[in-house]
């Protein structure tokens, strides 16, 4: 049986359309959701992400503001900046693009964002609410994983979901969201013994590891749903051949750009899946869509709507 490809771009487009409709309804009440994006210094990947977030704001009718402190910024200056955004009524969501320069205390900064404006869902108050099953702003990428499963009509309840990775940004919150959807959840990490034996039990396998092609075919139960959160850039011909030998379309991109993106799952492992998210074009597009969805939600919650 051919594995079904889960089209993240199409799902993200549908969510963005729904968000745009909500923005129109709010506009009728004189409300315009606003997002402040803080981008420190010049990290190329961060610049690309933030630019596309700001552009999506414009497409969907949000107000947005891009704030770009220099990479010499201090923790104090960043805290002042966040406090000012917390106080502004035209700002519903505050996004601080990570990573920050090492002199900045990232934790202190994330903790300083008003939980009601924490559209990344990284504040401990929101993490706690998520765990307690209270309405909260959930982290965007994990929320996107759930949207992909639901909108593709893939069952979650009663399924054994195995999450590889336990970061606060992806692994832990995705595990919590799956648990709330009544999956039986196993969380794995670098100290897990016989990882392959555990992942082979997965009906839903979520890979959030940060290692190119780490999940190999022998780690997958045939027919499983595979959600690949990983984004890894590969640049060597050796790596290319290891993952994509014989893939003419990839070869063309690689030849042109000198690099290509591979997930945390080896492409050969996808062939065993019942359904899977490709990289790129799977989970990635959902992250921005869910950021927009969270911002509208924050705008409504803050006004008691
Ligand atoms: P982190 O580095 O914070 O976490 C990686 C996790 O993988 C850790 O829990 C680590 O375990 C685990 N891990 C590492 N090596 C192994 C191993 N050999 N066996 C088992 N587990 C292992 O990464 P993130 O969670 O932030 O990101 C994960 C991936 O997702 C990355 O590729 C990242 O680029 C991508 N990503 C994609 C997004 C998107 O929009 N699609 C958004 C965010 C991230 P331990 O805790 O024991 O160290």
Image (cartoon, grey):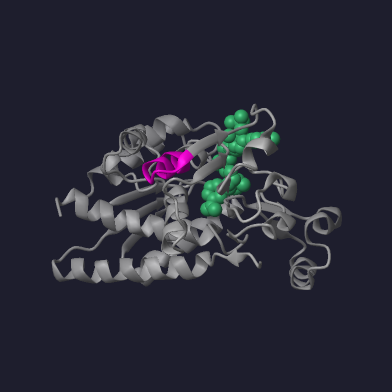
Q: Position of residue 66 (x, y in %)?
A: 40, 56
Q: Is residue 90 visible?
A: no
The foreground one among 276 and 33 is: 276
Q: Residue at x 38, y 67 (%)?
A: 16
Q: Position of residue 34 (x, y in %)?
A: 29, 58
Q: Is residue 291 visible?
A: yes
Residue 11: quadrant of the picture: bottom left
Q: Position of residue 235 (x, y in %)?
A: 78, 55
Is 20 placed above or below 300 here? below
Q: Quadrant holding ligand 1?
A: top right
Is 194 placed above or below 16 here? above
Judge left or right: residue 252 versus residue 204.
right
Is 122 placed above or below 294 here? above
Q: Is residue 177 magenta?
A: yes
Q: What quarter of the picture does the C terminus occupy? A: bottom left
Q: Residue at x 30, y 38 (%)?
A: 133
Q: Is residue 39 magenta?
A: no
Q: How many numbered callouts?
A: 0
Q: Residue at x 48, y 63 (%)?
A: 52
The foreground one among 76 and 228 is: 228
Main SS category, magenta section: helix
Q: Which residues are magenta?
A: 173-184
Judge left or right: residue 303 versus residue 92.
left
Residue 297: quadrant of the picture: bottom left
Residue 132: quadrant of the picture: top left
Q: Residue at x 46, y 43 (%)?
A: 174
Q: What quarter of the picture does the N terminus occupy? A: bottom right
Is 234 placed above or below 106 here? below
Q: Position of residue 70 (x, y in %)?
A: 50, 45
């Amino acid at each position: 049986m051919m594995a079904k490809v889960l089209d993240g771009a199409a799902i993200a487009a549908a969510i963005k359309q729904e968000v745009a409709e909500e923005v129109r309804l709010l506009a009728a009440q004189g409300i315009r959701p606003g997002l402040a994006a803080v981008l420190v210094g010049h990290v190329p990947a961060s610049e690309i992400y933030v630019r596309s977030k700001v552009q999506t704001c414009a497409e969907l009718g949000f107000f947005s503001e891009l704030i770009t402190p220099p990479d010499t910024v201090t923790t104090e200056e960043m805290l002042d900046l966040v406090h000012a955004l917390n106080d502004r009524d035209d700002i519903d969501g505050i996004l601080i693009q990570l990573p920050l320069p090492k002199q900045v205390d990232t934790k202190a900064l994330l903790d300083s964002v008003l939980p009601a404006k924490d559209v990344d869902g990284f504040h401990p108050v929101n993490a706690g609410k998520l765990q307690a099953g209270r309405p909260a702003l959930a982290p965007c990428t994990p929320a996107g994983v759930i949207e992909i499963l639901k909108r593709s009509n893939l069952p979650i309840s009663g399924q054994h979901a195995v999450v590889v990775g336990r970061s606060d940004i992806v692994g832990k919150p995705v595990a919590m969201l799956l648990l709330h959807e009544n999956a039986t959840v196993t969380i794995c990490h670098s100290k897990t013994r016989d990882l392959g034996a555990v992942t082979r039990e997965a009906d839903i396998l979520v890979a959030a590891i940060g290692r190119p092609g780490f999940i190999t075919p022998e780690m997958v139960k045939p027919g499983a749903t595979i959600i690949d959160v990983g984004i890894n850039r590969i640049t060597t011909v050796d790596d290319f051949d290891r993952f994509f030998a014989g893939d003419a379309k990839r070869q063309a991109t690689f030849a042109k750009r000198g690099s290509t993106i591979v997930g945390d799952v080896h492409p050969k492992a996808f062939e065993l899946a019942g359904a899977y998210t490709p990289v790129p074009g799977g989970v990635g597009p959902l992250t921005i869509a869910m950021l927009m969805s969270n911002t509208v939600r924050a705008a409504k919650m803050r006004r008691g709507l």
